[in-house]
Amino acid sequence: MKNKDLNRLKVVLAEKKRTNKWLAEQLGKDPATVSKWCTNSAQPNLENLMEIAKCLEVDVNELLRMDQHG
């Protein structure tokens, strides 16, 4: 369970009423890649994370789950 949901992308997308497909188009990424990020089966790198935050108009920290020690 060490790698449980490291990012909150799915939650933030829902809050902003945006879809994986919309985000993929904004970033010029494959929708399958964005889907993996949303399900936490893969993680975006820092550059992508910053682009995601910009697209969603949120702080990068809102996309991260910081309570990994519990």
Image: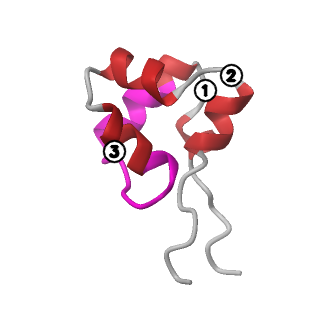
In the image, 55 versus 34, the foreground residue is: 34
Which residue type does callout 1 highlight?
Answer: Val
Crowdedness of circle 1 by 10 Å Cα count: few (<14), some, many (20+)?
Answer: some
> Can residue 51 be found in the magenta stretch?
yes
For numbered disc 1, what is the local secondary structure? loop
Residue at mark 2: 16
Crowdedness of circle 3 by 10 Å Cα count: few (<14), some, many (20+)?
Answer: few
Residue at image point 35% right, 47% down: 44
For numbered disc 3, what is the local secondary structure? helix
> Would residue 21 appear left or right of 44 to someone viewing this image?
right
Residue at image point 31% right, 42% down: 33
**The N terminus is located in which quarter?**
bottom right
Residue at mark 1: 58
Of labels 3 and 2, earlier in sequence is 2
Q: Which residues are magenta?
A: 37-53
Of labels 1 and 3, earlier in sequence is 3
Q: In the rendered view, would you say 47 is above or below 18?
A: below
Which residue type does callout 3 highlight?
Answer: Leu
Task: Give how far across and how far down residue 22 sits, in percent.
Answer: 46, 18
Residue at mark 3: 46
In the image, 51 versus 1, the foreground residue is: 1
Task: Give how far across and how far down residue 42 sits, in percent.
Answer: 36, 57
Report how far apart the C-alphas of labels 2 and 1 lie in the structure.
10 Å
